[in-house]
Amino acid sequence: MPEYDSIEALLEGEFGNSVHIECTKEATDRAVRFVHQHYRTRRCAFYLETDKGFDRDSVITYLRFFARLAGGSVTSEEAIAHFGLKSVAKIRIRKLSSEQRALLNFARMSLFEPEVVFCERPLSSITADTRSLVLAWMGSVVEAGGCIITCAEPLREALLLPGTAYYEEDGRFFPAKTALGSDDDQNEPAYEGDEVRVFKAPAKSDDATLLFDPREIDFIESVNRANYASVRGQLYPVQMTLDELDAELSRYGFFRRHRSYIVNVQKVVKVERFTRNSFNLTLSDVQHTSIPLAKGRAEEMRQRYGWN
């Protein structure tokens, strides 16, 4: 995947594709202008962090107003049902939680049956309990031939979204190596079975070196050329390479779900499918972490561990 010198070059080079960009606020504002200008002939829907709704409206009156503007086939009642807002349908927007306001914005966008969706930090207020509602809707937009463009979302969250993740560094934009790779990635170590072996994963915490039992680790991830072990909701820098960690941890029930994620399979509690080629793992860690999974890796995991 190519690198880009500016956010405009990225969006032009990936025109019509779904991209998710970890970037600054300044780059986000430029991206909004680009989408307004270059996608103006297509049905667009926008969700910015400043979009809070009309405080005096109730959820139902707010969405009925936008349903009339949209004039489409999706009703306000259907949007409310899909995004789990039935219990607050008659509540005024000013009384909603931040998550409920976020879901309201997704419901509003769905009324326009958009071909292009632009979101600023779309998952920032969404909890693990309702994330599947948002990801399922985004997946349906992509399956229908549309595209999703997001900005300012942390890379770990951006990787959950359908499309390709990028990150900004010194004004340039690089494809995330943790993005979903092809199903036939090369040079991955073969599974060696469950032989007993003593191993402690070394990680840094200030000036100390911590040695984690593999059973304590939820997953290992690589972000912006650095590796981290997630233990009880905290990320600790790890100096070992992912290849080295994979070779050691595969013996303890870890699975390298793509080039830059190694997951403790014992912590996986749910596997969900959002698009034809996009799956998601949910872990039982304190954050209920969601991790993207390519179709080929989902099949490999199913066969290896005997899941139906």
Image (cartoon, grey):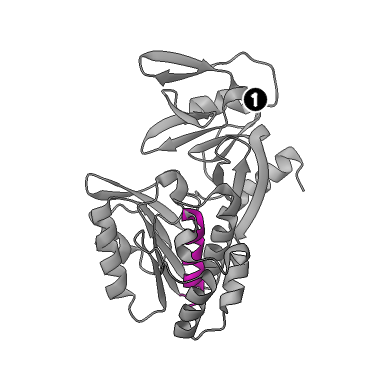
Instruction: Tell me which residue sits at (46%, 48%) in the image.
Output: 157
Query: The magenta stretch spans which residues?
Result: 98-114
Name the foreground residue: 122 vs 250: 122
Let me know if residue 78 appears in the view: yes
Q: Quadrant of residue 262?
A: top right
- Is 168 drawn above or below residue 140 in the view shown? above
The kind of secondary structure element at disc 1 is helix
Q: What percent of the width, then of the height, locates residue 208?
A: 40, 13
Name the foreground residue: 207 vs 78: 78
Q: Is residue 62 left or right of residue 206?
A: right
Q: What percent of the width, then of the height, locates residue 182?
A: 52, 50
Name the foreground residue: 161 vs 127: 127
How many numbered discs, if any? 1
Q: Is residue 214 magenta?
A: no
Instruction: Tell me which residue sits at (34%, 75%) in the image.
Output: 39
- Which residue, given by chain and number where applicable, does mark 1 sit on? 252
Instruction: Tell me which residue sits at (40%, 19%) in the image.
Output: 205
Instruction: Tell me which residue sits at (64%, 52%) in the image.
Output: 272
Q: What percent of the width, then of the height, locates residue 275?
A: 59, 61
Q: What percent of the width, then of the height, locates residue 70?
A: 46, 82
Q: Amino acid at mark 1?
A: Tyr
Q: Is residue 282 left or right of residue 238?
A: right
Label 1 packing within 10 angstroms: few (<14), some (14-19), many (20+) = many
Q: Is residue 111 magenta?
A: yes
Q: Main secondary structure of the magenta part?
A: helix
Q: Quadrant of residue 288?
A: top right
Q: Is residue 43 left or right of residue 128?
A: left
